[in-house]
Image (cartoon, coloured by chain):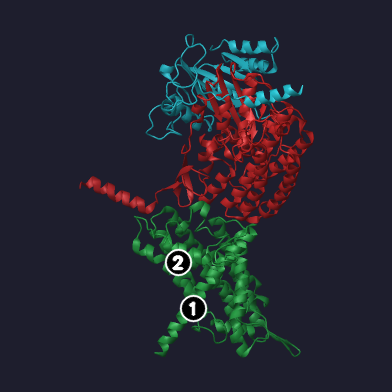
């Protein structure tokens, strides 16, 4: 799923067969930056970048998308301690995705840049020399996922206490509160759209 | 024997007067501030209008534990609030409430007042230094810097008054203002100095007095949003009460000096002789009340200046203006 | 003691006497001007700050992890606790993202109600700023006046949603249709409370008046200008680099407002101006917020006239299962761009929810902007950035 945008195809099936505006934008942005691929779903443009080209690509992209919005990561894991896992764990390639969003300040353009980072060598270049705002985001990603950002000199924990052990946003990290008291669990999911069905009933009785 | 009795009476009367007046000013601040902020303010204590609120606050403070930080210099720390309060109380000794109603009529009353009122900053510096707290230290240092900057315009403004009155006795200054300035036919005109060319001096004196009181807009030594409570940070219980009383008492004290120097003190046109002794205190208190209200009003309206802005205001504006004021007054005095 | 040691000692003694070493001043986590539990470790030389290291996380609640074990409906209850000063506004981008993911669109009336409540939240948030900012500079009175007016806004929010701070009013596909809690089939309780629009427009008149009052009390005040004009200037390129958004960015001359540039809800149907100022200093940040209150009042007045009648809730399946996909949804919160990046793997809960909280990004500039400032300016600058610690720590 790295550079073949399966999901993008799915999304475009639901709309028209020709490319949407967002998809056109995604394609041209990818081409301009020389990135490896893109996906576009729900108007969310994702541009896939090689790990080695991470810093250069984002710096180049910031020419047209100057607003540094945020940086984070996703832990793609076959097993999860809490919550729902991935759809098809067998075919999943275990990895981190480091994601960074830049956007324009004149129009709705913006893209999420995605670099895949293997779990056994979780490191990527740091954006701090180019974006001052990246420091805290990288520190957060470092403590939450144990991803090293080479070039960030201040990778000390941001949120967590200094003596905290573990990386909470990893899928392998258990949520202690859930272990102790399994709520809401699978069984006790709040029947959410009660009100909605009520209103449907009300409408039904009217017609 | 007679001397000692008189001394005791004087001290007791003075203390009662000062402490009551500061309680009244505290109450006035609570109420006036509340109404300026569209609040009601104290309402229940005392049964009506919350008049007993300052007393209740005082009692509450007295019950609080008297804490002192581990690293504090205990002697200095404990002594500091009393230095502040003492210097304030001493001001009242020379303030004339009437022609004969003055505890001590010093020939150098003005000099005494200026010297003794600056002592309170020493107490503040002691408090800031001995608290073993960085915020307190910075507050104390700010207070000291403020003193240096503001003592000069204050003194220079007073110098102009001394020049105009030709005496350093506070009583003499009041009488100089009650003397006939000029006569329009049979109508003798006696005006306080503020109406005799001392507007600038009065303004400089009031600005400097507010700065010396460390009240908004010059409350940098306390500066709650910057230094938590500045030199007061570590104080609690009775020692805090002392500082608190001291602040309000010196507000009254400095207002009394301003009223005496610039507004004619106990004097009022047409009030002479024995009547001056009877009505004098009331007249002076009225003038003090106006000035105190002004200070309270400023406090609830304006934000705080920055320390360097205060310094540059003092050195580049107030001191030259005060010098100009002296020159003008002196020239005026020589010519007429 | 060897002679080397002695030399070393004497040298250090001399250096202490000659050049005063920097003092480390711990500002916070309990400090009147840090709005909660922010801690700044500042190296100061007298009053001048050499270096400052913000320490956050005292209030970290791990919402991103908690969201992974909650259904989409349950997450709405979490997200309005991120920025509690404008709780409703932080619900909106999340619910819009989920709706986009599920292919549901809320009925038009629900969109308008969301818009009105978002703008009320904006006014309420800005009034908190307008009240607390002069307080940080030492002026206590604007606080009372604007908090009093904010109470009218909170009452409006409360009568619609049932909560003053945490409305939890959005549902996937609409808004909660019955007010006052509980489900009932009575038709009249399915809509906004009676007389809501009348009370809203009365409150809007009050807002106009308080803006004028604040103008006379604060805006024109010479001392406020002395403390804020030219203090803490953020140039636009730095603002973008540090990801500042909202009024902080607009005060630096970048007219970036998602309500205009990436319109959502029904913002494209109302007329309003994007307030921006060129200076980038504390005074401009204050002015932008004050003017935004006026713009919000304009928006709400139009919305009251334009809101159509109709249902409040679209038809949605009983159990919400999102399709697989990634969606980034953002909205212009009172404090700036607020976004949610939802990664769905096709279940009832998100696989990953990245919360782009505004104050967090707005605060990343602190170490840069505070370097070399005076301590009184630290308070002025920090206050002008208008952050909420819940929004920083998530």
Q: Are marks 2 and 1 in contact (CB under 8 Å)?
A: no
Q: Colour of chain A?
A: cyan
Name which of mark 2 and mark 1 comes first in the sequence. Answer: 1
x and y, in percent, of residue A153 in the image: 43, 31
Of residues C236 and C193, which is closer to you in this image? C193
The residue shown at (38%, 66%) is B79
Find numbered disc 2 in the image and state the secondary structure of the residue it sits on: helix
- Residue A96 location in percent, x, y? 48, 19
Q: Which mark is residue B14?
A: 1
Q: Is residue A151 above or below residue B295?
A: above
Which residue reaches farthest right? C305
Q: CA gap, disc 2 to disc 1?
A: 16 Å
Name the residue tied to disc 2.
B242
Quick check: can you spot residue B326?
no
Number of labels in the image equals: 2
Mark 1 falls on what kind of element?
helix
Residue B77 in percent (x, y) is at: 38, 62
For disc 1, the neighbor class at 10 Å (few under 14, some 14 to 19, many from 20) is: some
For the colour red, the matching chain is: C
Q: Is residue C205 left or right of residue C351?
A: right
Q: Image height check: is B18 above or below C323?
A: below
Q: Colour of chain B?
A: green
- Left or right: C202 with respect to B225? right
């Amino acid at each position: 799923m790295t550079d073949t945008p399966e999901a993008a195809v799915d999304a475009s099936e639901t709309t028209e067969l020709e490319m949407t505006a967002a998809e056109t934008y995604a394609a041209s942005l990818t081409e301009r930056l020389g990135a490896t691929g893109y996906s576009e779903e729900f108007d969310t443009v994702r541009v896939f970048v090689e790990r080695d080209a991470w810093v250069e690509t984002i710096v180049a992209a910031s020419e047209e998308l100057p607003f540094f919005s945020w940086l984070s990561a996703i832990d793609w894991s076959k097993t999860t301690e809490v919550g729902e896992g991935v759809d098809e764990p067998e075919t999943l390639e275990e990895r981190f995705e480091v994601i960074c969003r830049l956007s324009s300040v004149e129009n709705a353009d913006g893209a999420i840049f995605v670099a895949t980072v293997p779990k056994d060598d979780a490191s990527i270049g740091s954006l701090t020399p180019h974006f001052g705002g990246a420091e805290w985001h990288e520190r957060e990603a470092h403590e939450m996922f144990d991803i090293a950002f080479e070039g960030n000199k201040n990778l000390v924990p941001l949120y967590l206490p200094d003596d905290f052990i573990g990386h909470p946003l990893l899928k392998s990290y258990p949520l202690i509160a859930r272990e102790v008291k399994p709520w809401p669990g699978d069984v006790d999911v709040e029947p959410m759209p009660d009100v909605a069905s009520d209103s449907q009933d009300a409408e039904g009785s009217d017609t | 024997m007679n001397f000692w009795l008189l001394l005791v009476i004087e001290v007791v009367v003075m203390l009662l007067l000062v402490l009551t007046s500061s309680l009244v000013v505290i109450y006035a601040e609570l109420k006036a501030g509340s109404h300026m902020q569209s609040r009601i303010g104290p309402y229940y204590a005392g049964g009506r209008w919350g008049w007993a609120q300052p007393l209740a606050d005082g009692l509450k403070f007295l019950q609080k534990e008297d804490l002192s930080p581990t690293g504090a210099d205990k002697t200095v720390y404990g002594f500091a609030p009393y230095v502040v309060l003492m210097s304030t109380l001493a001001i009242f000794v020379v303030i004339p409430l009437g022609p004969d109603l003055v505890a001590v009529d010093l020939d150098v009353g003005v000099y005494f007042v200026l010297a003794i009122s600056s002592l309170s900053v020493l107490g503040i510096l002691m408090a800031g230094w001995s608290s073993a707290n960085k915020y307190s230290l910075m507050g104390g240092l700010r207070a000291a810097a403020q003193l240096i900057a503001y003592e000069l315009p204050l003194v220079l403004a007073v110098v102009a008054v001394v020049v105009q009155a030709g005496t350093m006795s506070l009583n003499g200054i009041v009488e100089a203002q009650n003397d006939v300035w000029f006569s329009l036919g049979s109508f003798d005109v006696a005006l306080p100095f503020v109406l005799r060319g001392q507007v600038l001096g009065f303004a400089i004196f009031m600005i400097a007095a507010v700065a010396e009181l460390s009240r908004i807009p010059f409350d940098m030594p306390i500066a709650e949003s910057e230094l938590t409570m500045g030199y007061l940070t570590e104080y609690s219980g009775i020692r805090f009460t002392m500082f608190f009383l001291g602040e309000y008492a010196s507000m009254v004290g400095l207002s009394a000096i301003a009223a005496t120097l610039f507004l004619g003190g106990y004097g009022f046109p047409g009030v002479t002789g024995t009547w001056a002794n009877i009505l004098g205190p009331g007249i002076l208190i009225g003038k003090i009340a106006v000035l105190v209200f002004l200070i309270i009003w400023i406090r609830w309206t304006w934000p705080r200046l920055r320390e360097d802005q205060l310094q540059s205001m003092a050195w580049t504006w107030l001191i030259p203006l005060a010098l100009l004021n002296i020159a003008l007054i002196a020239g005026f005095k020589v010519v007429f | 003691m060897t002679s080397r040691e002695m030399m070393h000692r004497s040298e250090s003694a001399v250096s202490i006497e000659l050049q005063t070493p920097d003092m480390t001043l711990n500002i916070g986590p309990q400090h009147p001007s840090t709005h909660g539990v922010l801690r700044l470790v500042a190296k100061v030389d007298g009053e001048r700050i050499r270096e400052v290291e913000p320490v956050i996380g005292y209030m970290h609640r791990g919402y991103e992890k908690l969201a992974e074990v909650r259904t989409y409906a349950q997450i709405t209850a979490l997200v309005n606790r991120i920025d509690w000063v404008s709780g409703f506004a932080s619900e909106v981008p999340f619910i819009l993202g989920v709706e986009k993911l599920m292919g549901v669109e809320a009925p038009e009336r629900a969109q308008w109600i969301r818009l009105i409540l978002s703008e009320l939240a904006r006014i309420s948030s800005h009034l908190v700023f307008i009240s607390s900012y002069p307080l940080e500079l030492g002026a206590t009175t604007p606080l009372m006046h604007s908090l009093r007016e904010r109470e009218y806004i909170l009452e409006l929010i409360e009568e619609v949603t049932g909560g003053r701070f945490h409305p939890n009013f959005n549902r996937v596909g609409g808004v909660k249709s019955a007010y006052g809690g509980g489900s009932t089939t009575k038709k009249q309780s399915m809509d906004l409370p009676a007389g809501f629009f009348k009370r809203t427009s009365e409150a809007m008149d009050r807002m106009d008046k308080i803006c004028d009052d604040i103008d006379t009390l604060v805006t024109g005040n010479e001392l406020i200008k002395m403390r804020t004009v030219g203090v803490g200037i953020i140039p636009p390129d730095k603002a973008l680099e540090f990801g500042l958004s909202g009024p902080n960015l607009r005060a630096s001359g970048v007219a970036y407002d998602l309500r205009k540039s990436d319109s959502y809800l029904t913002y494209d149907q109302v007329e309003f101006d994007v307030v921006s100022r060129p200076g980038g200093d504390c005074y401009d940040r204050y002015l932008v917020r004050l003017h935004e209150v006026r713009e919000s009042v304009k928006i709400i007045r139009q919305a009251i006239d334009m809101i159509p009648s109709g249902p409040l809730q679209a038809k949605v399946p009983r159990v919400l299962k999102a399709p697989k996909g990634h969606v980034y949804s953002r909205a212009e919160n009172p404090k700036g761009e607020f976004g949610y990046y939802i990664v769905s793997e096709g279940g009832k809960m998100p696989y990953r929810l990245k919360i782009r909280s505004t104050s967090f990004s707005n605060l990343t500039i602190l170490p840069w902007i505070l370097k070399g400032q005076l301590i009184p300016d630290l308070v002025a600058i920090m206050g002008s950035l208008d952050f909420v610690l819940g929004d920083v720590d998530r």
